[in-house]
Amino acid sequence: MIGTVYRFEVAYHLKRPVTYLYALVYFLLAFAFSASDAVQLGGAGALVKNNAPFVLAQVEMILVAGGQVIITALVGTAVLRDYLVGAHELLFTTPITRAAYLGGRFLGVLTVMALINFMIPVGAAVGTLMPWVDHEKLLPFRATAYLQPFVTMVLPSVLLISAIFFAVGALTRNLFAIYTQGMFLLVAWGITGRLTRDLDNQHIAALIDPFGLSAFTELTKYWTVAERNGLLVPLAGDLLLNRLLWSLIAAGLFALTYALFRFRSEPPRLARRTRDETGAASVPPAPVAMPQINRQFGAGARLRQLLMLSRLSFLNIIREMPFIAIVAIGMTNLVMNAAYADALYGQTVYPVTYTIVETLDGSFALFFVILITIYGGEAIWRERQLKLDQVTDALPVPSWVTLLGKFAGLGLMEAFLLLLLVGAGIAIQTAKGFHHYEPGLYFSYLFGTTLPSLLQLTALAFLVHALVNNKFVGHVVMLVLYFFRFVMSNLGIEHQLFRYAQPASFTYSDMNGYGPFVPNLVLSIVYWSGTALVLGVVAYLFWVRGTGQPFRVRAAIARKRWTKGAMAVAGAGLVVAVTAGGTIFYNTNVRNVYETTKQVRRLQAAYERDYRKLKDLPKPRLVDAKVRADLEPEHRAFGVSGTFTYVNKSPRAIDTVIVTTGHPRIRIDSLAWSRTVTAVLTDSAKGTRIFRFSPPLAVADTVTLRYRARWEERGFRNNGPGTVVVANGTFVNTEYFPALGYQEGLELTSEVSRKKEKLPPRERMPSINDEAARANSYLGNDADLMSFQATVSTAPDQIAIAPGYLVKEYQENGRRVFEYKMDRPILNFYSFLSARYAVKRDTSNGVNLEIYYHPGHEYDLDRMMESMKKSLAYFSAKFSPYQYRQVRILEFPRYAGFAQAFPNTVPYSEGIGFILKATDKDDDLDMPFFVTAHEVGHQWWGHQVVGANMQGATLMSEGLAEYSALTAMEKRYGPAQAKKFLQNELDRYLTGRANETKREMPLLLVENQPYIHYNKGSLALYALRDLIGEDSINAALSRFVRDKGFQGPPYTTAKEFLGYLRAVTPDSLKYAITDLFETITLWDNRVEEATSERKPDGTYLVRIKVKSLKFRADSLGNQTEIPIHDLVDVGVFGAREKGNALGRPLAVVKRWITTKESTIEMVVAEQPLKAGVDPYNKLIDRLPQDNVREIRPGKAPGPGDGGKP
Amino acid sequence: MRLEIERLSKTYPNGVRALNNVSLSIGTGMFGLLGPNGAGKSTLMRTIATLQPPDSGSIRFGDLDVLAEPDELRKVLGYLPQEFGLYPSQSAEATLDHFAALKGVVSAGERRELVTSLLHQTNLYEPRKKSVGTFSGGMRQRLGIAIALAGSPELLIVDEPTAGLDPTERHRFLNLLGEIGQNIVVILSTHIVEDVRELCSSMAIINRGEVILSGDPETIVEKVRGTLWRKTVSKAELAACEQRYQVVSVRLLAGRPVIHISSPTNPGDGFIEVEPDLEDVYFQQIGLSAAKAAA
């Protein structure tokens, strides 16, 4: 019996064209992924190949999870189908059993689902065969790479999805539920994904992700390139548990369906709904006189009707259970996001309104898309679904009133939800104890930018549904349009005039408000509103009124509706759209040069092709810079000028010099040499000029360049307005000043882009053995230490700052002018800032400390100030004296999110430092303190010692600054904070190397790779300090500064630096220098077993069975085991105590570990609870969590149980 | 006020000729449109109700060209389609209020008065606060007619309103219609002959998209007097009779078939003349038109 039902079900689906349509969609999605660049999925990159097992597994999982939205009807209707066609009463009265009916149907749809999903691996595999696919992005074909994830990941998910959809379909028999359950599941999935960001919830999130992607990510997050390309993802650990758990849940769901399902006409109900039969009593109707009424059809009546229809349409939506459910899910998602909204780079920030409003807007965006798609369709189809359309269509209400009423209903729904969001935002701020609410910002953001875009999308949904006139197809068309909008830029359609209903992107800043984004933002909103109006009129023309109208008839009706009124409205929309769009175009393409990504790439490539050959041309070096910047924040313009004095320090006369004028769009007013020159070439597009000196510049001879240029922001570009000079918070750097010589920094760096431009692969940095590269420091290639002075003028109400000490401040022509002069040579590295600042001042040991901040951002000033004091004190005492008399921190708008150390000057983004919230709780890192200390550290590591521009340079700048800041933080807050910090560093290092796009380097050879110089840098230096002691390492650093500080060429190298470290390291520990700096070394330490035994004297003997492996990795992460001979921490911990997550340390000692397996015995005085090897994770270990284990009380294993004593 | 339908034709994209040259002239009072399922009744009703443009032909209501100015007709139209739903969560009162407003009764006071009187008239005053979703079929149907009546229509079109109603409901409903139908044009489509006989002052029978007979029921019945004959036969004879005569209807009376046949002259053979009623006329006409179509 079950076989018959099964065969019938499968045959039924195989006969339906839609089954093949689904299969085709799945095939094409996977095909598009592997055969084109438009669809980027699964974490493939420059090194991880498109058909790597890791990537394929991920792609298959993502497509299964995402595809359910499309396929929901197939399973959902397996049972409902009988009800829809009315066959249920016939069927249920046959002798078929419930088990056979449900079992056969379920197995049938399951088979069909599996077949359709099988198109994913097939599509991905076929895609790789296409002739245009770049074979360097592929590994040799390997069938198991496609099939293994299909079996382990896809099939369990298909089982689960089918079980859920089958249950919902069979038990609710509600079409709406069936069509939307996929979206629900997807959203619920998104929420679980959200949970994984919280590190502590890794296991739970891994288990509760129904598709196993979180478990997969957890399992593979530290996988190296080699592993991603080479290994099949094993079904193990949480992933195995996850798959088992959800398969069981699927089985349970089916059992539940079986238990609840009855062969009855009505779906099972939880609460009985009764039909009301009152009024059916046979009282004959009393004749009632009809009142005289007055009917109106004028404008007033239309308005009243419009209001009524809007209200009804609004109420009809918000009263629906699915709506309430979607909003509830959305709100839950939002609250969860908002709970983390103040988390920034793992840190907590104050929930200032812009962070909250951005979170609200961002996390509800998907829900708005879902709601507009569903309820746009519902609104249009509501009367037809209720079979009320013939009644309403025959009413004396013009179609435009009906349409507008429905539109307004959706608009009201959107506005209502936005109001809810404002309420939620304020509630979240309050819950976080933050009371500086900015209602104006909430409203301008959500109602000024979000609402118009939602209304525009609604108009599009109306148009699509009106034209398509089939609800399901209408939804699919909408999804296709969203998808298209999503991949558009990958297809090369980049102009903002094509991004329907997307307000121009903007960044709100506390310092500068909406700032320079306003014109583009307003124009884009007006432009799309005009366009939406035109779409709305077209929707009206094709609005279906009446029944049985083929398109021919509807076209005829549309012609009738194309009246003067309709023309006028469409015309008005068109005029608005054309005017606003034209203004946008004028800004993006006429006032500015419109460049696609491809054009920019091409120009960059041309620069390299034309001029790289001149890279080694000797050039005179800058010895003195007198610069001036005249900032006009009011007009978003500035002038720069300067007198630059160069000396020929090369051993030969120089006859030719290249001047790179940075920005190609800067207007150069004068560029004059103090000697006779011939302009050999002027290539303005690439900002390159070549001059010939006649006679050539002799050795040690001097030449002066006078330069004057002006930069003006003209309106806005396609990707928005420039943010260099803005009303409040200008930040101009040396990019606007001339530099001598070919600039390697302007080359294309992405290997993918280089390949497209047929450029050879590019070395990130010169080799550490390239002696010639020592001629230049890592900061600048046309200067060594130079003398510097700067004049800055700005608006009268602003303070402008440049490196150096303030010499003079005065008013001139209505401008406020500041003159700065540096009293000792600096690197060619400076900037100008200007804003309406408030200033906080202090001094410490004769050093002036100043923070220039935006009034209102007082939150972290004290921490920054304290950090400056503490770090200056420690660094001056241990490394070398501070070279300046002042440190200034300058806030700038969050258009960029970094802090950067210039001589005595630290620009610091409002987004990363000024709203960070550090509490005094143990486990909360004081990031304002840390970041400030890092930048102060750069005054030594960067401005006192600067490495040659070669491999390893950033170890000595970023690595040492990070280590110095860590040490300063540890001094202030104690070792627990340092440990917490290092845990984050380890995680970021391991994640960073997993996402490496070229090759991982040892620290010694780091090629400006942040995860190596910051994260591994602090780990390695901290580990070394732990081995050799703080004094030794400080001695090395201090000698290093003494010998190499304020040096000219040849600049120092990381090899020299390691020499200093090696000098203070005892021979027995020199292996650590090799492990930490010269190679990529990883450890795998774990406690296999730990037992304790109470001895007669009351002490405890703890035996720890330890497994310790040590590996060397190559640049792709291929590991080779090497023998271990390391000094490692071993510890025993007791009762929990504050500040010690592991418990009170009873004994933590360093032991030499020389074998893979060993048993360590320790005696402690108190009851031991946990034992660990490298318990504080000082070594780089991909599974740090198994280093510590609970101690099993009882008799300790004897020495004979394996392991040596 | 008369409704004049001339040479109305409509062919669906699938080739079905739903209306074929239909012409009717309908005055005030109840007009019954009788025909089997699929005869084109609903198409005709929908076409008159401005919901579906015909391929050709014209419809005039008084001086109004309905096809050219559908909006004008809608102002005087009350329409109750054959099958319809309502916003399930709305109460009867709110539903009526909503539709009254959409029909141009903008003043809230007037609307309240109108709604109250319609609720009384349709005997829905008691359950007026109940949501429509809980209503029985008859209650929903009465609410439907209340909606159709709201705004004092001059043309009322009701499409098979009694289908699915129990006898009490049906009775009540027809009484209501009868009362309204005295001063305005009411078109009632049905395949239940009784409805027409009880209510309508004039009628038409349509089949396969064509009007096959129209007039007032009494005249129509008179027309066929003398052409209908009845005989009780055995089951064995039935087939032979169906061969030989134009059988209009076969009914069982105490388990034995009673056949009615159509014949201009007395067929003899034991047939007795039948006092004609509308049902016989209906079956006869449908049978004749089917025979014509088959020929």
Image: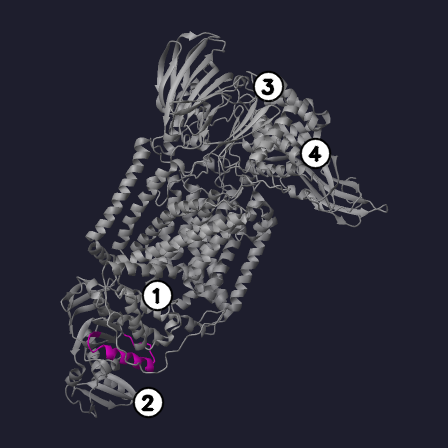
Name the element at disc 1. Answer: helix
| Cα separation between marks 1 and 4 | 76 Å
Percent coordinates x, y for residue A350 in the rendering: 53, 42
Q: Mark 3 points at which residue?
A: A1045
Q: Quadrant of residue A1115?
A: top right
Q: Are marks 1 and 2 in contact (CB under 8 Å)?
A: no
- Viewer-side label of 1, 3: 3
Name the element at disc 3. Answer: loop
Q: Name the residue under label 2.
A: B255
| Cα separation between marks 3 and 2 | 121 Å
Asked if one can make out residue A112 in the rendered structure from this viewpoint, the answer is no
Q: Which chain carries label 4?
A: A
> Which residue appears farthest toward the bottom when viewing the image?
B270
Q: What are the residue bounds of the magenta stretch?
A: B160-186
Q: Are marks 3 and 2 in contact (CB under 8 Å)?
A: no
Percent coordinates x, y for residue A524 in the rendering: 34, 41
- Viewer-side label of 1, 2: 1
| Cα separation between marks 1 and 3 | 83 Å
Q: How crowded is mark 4: few (under 14 residues within 10 Å), some or many (20 or more)?
A: some
- Viewer-side label of 4, 2: 4
Q: Residues within 10 Å of mark 3 (few under 14, many from 20)?
A: many
**Amino acid found under the numbered disc labelled 4:** Ile
**Amino acid found under the numbered disc labelled 3:** Gly
* Label 1 or label 3, whichever comes before in sequence order: 1
Percent coordinates x, y for residue A848 in the rendering: 57, 25
Residue occupying the point 55% across, 21% down: A948
Have a look at marks 1 and 4 and say if they share a chain: yes
Asked if one can make out residue B281 in the rendered structure from this viewpoint, the answer is yes
Q: Mark 2 lies on which chain?
A: B
Q: Mark 1 points at which residue?
A: A386
Name the element at disc 4. Answer: loop
Q: Mark 4 points at which residue?
A: A1124
